[in-house]
Amino acid sequence: MEGKRIDILSDSTGETAEKVVRAAMLQFPHSGALIRLHTRVRTKEAARPILESAAKSGALVVFTVVSPELREFIHASSYELKIEALDLIGSLIGKIGTFLDRQPINTPSAMLPLSDEYFRRIEAVEFTVKSDDGKEPRNFRKADLVLVGVSRTSKTPLSTLLAQRGLKVANLPIVMGIQPPPELEEAQQERVVCLTIELNQLVEIRKARLKQLGMPMDTGYGLVDQVRLELDYAHTIFRAHPHWPIIDVTGRAIEETAVIILESLKERDEAAKQARAALV
């Protein structure tokens, strides 16, 4: 599949379609396929050149368009141009409309009024950016989630991904010989999650980072013995807080780890709810 292309065509931001495609692409880690995003495509005139380009390059077209007329145009053009095309949302809208016995409004999401949920997510992202890498320890007690772990255990990308789900996330790097700030004990302890990783993979990740930065490979940051000591030190802190769940990110995509964290939080919330109910 090397060199193949997937064109994502959307009448809005394309975020939904891109997430679905990228989630599916995780099953093809060495495909070499290129994803191109075309947003706010709301007319036949805007769609046609994209489809013609896809036909010339033999691209797959994945589209999310709510206008029935534009959807029909894309279907017809795809047939005419012999393009492989996938309508991600059209059939779903139809099924839901039948199920609810309602007619869809057929308005792109970017043109709808902004919801409370939208502003909640924006607030979560802003909080998470400010609370990255232990910059604002005072935010630990305000956070919905605090991630802790040694350097290069995916704390920042995980924080960003979870913030997009509406969670206010802070993260703290565990540094050899340095005790976590006292503010960590003020966080909701059932919302502190530890991240760990297998030694050899962490060494490889760190060496790749050193190479990217143009730094010597014999820097302590990437040496096996030093990395082992850091992991041991982190686990000493983790063991001192047995109620903090430990999640191994070895070989996992951040999306998979995020799901595990969310499921862990849900289980803890359910257990706490049942415990409170038992006291009533």
Image: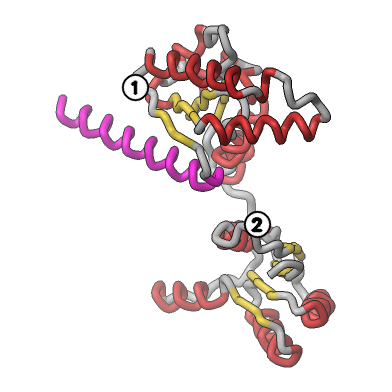
Is 274 above or below relative to 223?
A: below
Q: Which residue position holds label 1?
A: 243
Query: Viewer-proximal residue, 39 or 152?
Result: 152
Q: Quadrant of residue 127?
A: top right
Q: Earlier in the sequence, mark 2 or mark 1?
A: 2
Q: Amino acid at mark 1?
A: His
Question: In x, y percent, where is residue 187?
Answer: 46, 18
- Quadrant assignment, res 67: bottom right
Indicate whether 68 appears above or below 124: below
Q: Residue at x 62, y 72 (%)?
A: 66
Q: Look at the image and tell me in which quarter the N terminus lies.
A: bottom right
Looking at the rendered image, the quarter that the C terminus falls into is top left
What is the tally of numbered marks visible in this picture? 2
**What residue would you read off at disc 2?**
15
Q: Is residue 260 magenta?
A: yes
Picture colour scheme? secondary structure
Q: Main secondary structure of the magenta part?
A: helix
What's the amino acid at mark 2?
Glu
For the point 59% across and 24% down, which residue is it? 224
Q: Is residue 199 magenta?
A: no
Asked whether the beta carbons under mark 2 and mark 1 sit within 8 Å of each other, the answer is no
Cα distance in 3D space between marks 2 and 1: 36 Å
> In the rendered image, is residue 150 in sight?
yes
Q: Which stretch appears magenta?
A: 252-280
Which circle marks residue 268 in the picture? none
Residue 191 percent across, percent down from the top left: 42, 26
